[in-house]
Image: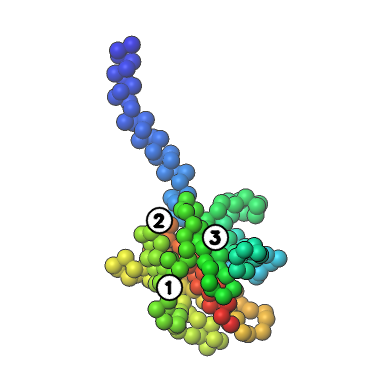
Amino acid sequence: MRRMKLTVYLLLPLIVAIINTQLVCFDHRYARHNRPNHPISYSFTDWGENFMLLVPPSNASPSYKISASLNLNPFLPISTVTKVEMILSETNLEELQFVGEFEVSLHHTRGVLSMVSEPPIRLSNVVSSASRGDWFWTHGDVRLRWDCRTRLEDGSPMCICYGLDGLSVQLATFIPPPVLAPPPLPDAILTIFPDGFRDEFFEHILISILVIQRKTTMLL
């Protein structure tokens, strides 16, 4: 019995290490993306009944489902609710994992952000604008800046995302279709640079530009 206890005692650190390793492997923050050595461009599909997809190149994964709805709660301002979910199975679009959700009222008087494993927070505490087309995103340890002041020939903004962690490296670019042009419109393109795949940066880059686009288009 004493020898057995001693064996368990000696093996306990190894057991704990194995358990922690398994937990990390299944932690959503570590399982979604591997850091590539080159930028990857994602395309937004056409808007369907109430959702669109963010689709990577054929040799990359995963894809994301972006859906939108109206909140008609009579005790709150009418608002749009945008939900982002990761698609776990390319053959079943209903097999999803929640990433984040944000709500913006029609007159911007109310905004709420919910990220996975985080409590809801007022959107005004996360996103701000110093000047037209210059946006800042602060959520926990993630600090981003989106510069959307440059315009392309077709009128679309050329948005560039920088990290504000001291290095100010470029993390992503985003080009939406020209919203006032007649259809058919080109796909919106989100390009993520290698540093944009660090930890949970990808999800914050995606949700932050969706928030900015929602706020921008609601002013048109």
Query: Residue drawn at (54%, 86%), measured in percent from left and top?
Result: 155
Name the quarter where the C terminus is drawn. bottom right
Residue hosting label 1: 128
Residue 194 in sight in this render: no
Query: Residue drawn at (62%, 54%), measured in percent from left and top?
Result: 90
Q: Are marks 2 and 3 in contact (CB under 8 Å)?
A: no
**Which-is-in-front pick, marks 2 and 3?**
3
Q: Is residue 5 left or right of residue 103?
A: left
| Secondary structure beneath label 2 | loop
* Amino acid on which disc 3 is placed: Glu
Disc 1 versus disc 3: distance between alpha carbons?
A: 18 Å
- Tell me the crowding category of disc 1: few under 14, some 14 to 19, or many 20 or more residues within 10 angstroms, Cα based: some
* Amino acid on which disc 2 is placed: Asp
Residue hosting label 2: 199
Q: Earlier in the sequence, mark 1 or mark 3?
A: 3
Look at the picture and state if 148 lies above or below 33: below
Q: Earlier in the sequence, mark 2 or mark 1?
A: 1
Residue hosting label 3: 101
| Secondary structure beneath label 1 | strand
Q: Residue furthest front?
A: 75
Q: In the rendering, at what x and y percent does residue 23 appear?
A: 43, 40
Q: In the rendering, at what x and y percent does residue 62 appear?
A: 54, 56
| Secondary structure beneath label 3 | strand
The quadrant in which residue 167 appears is bottom left
Q: Earlier in the sequence, mark 2 or mark 3?
A: 3
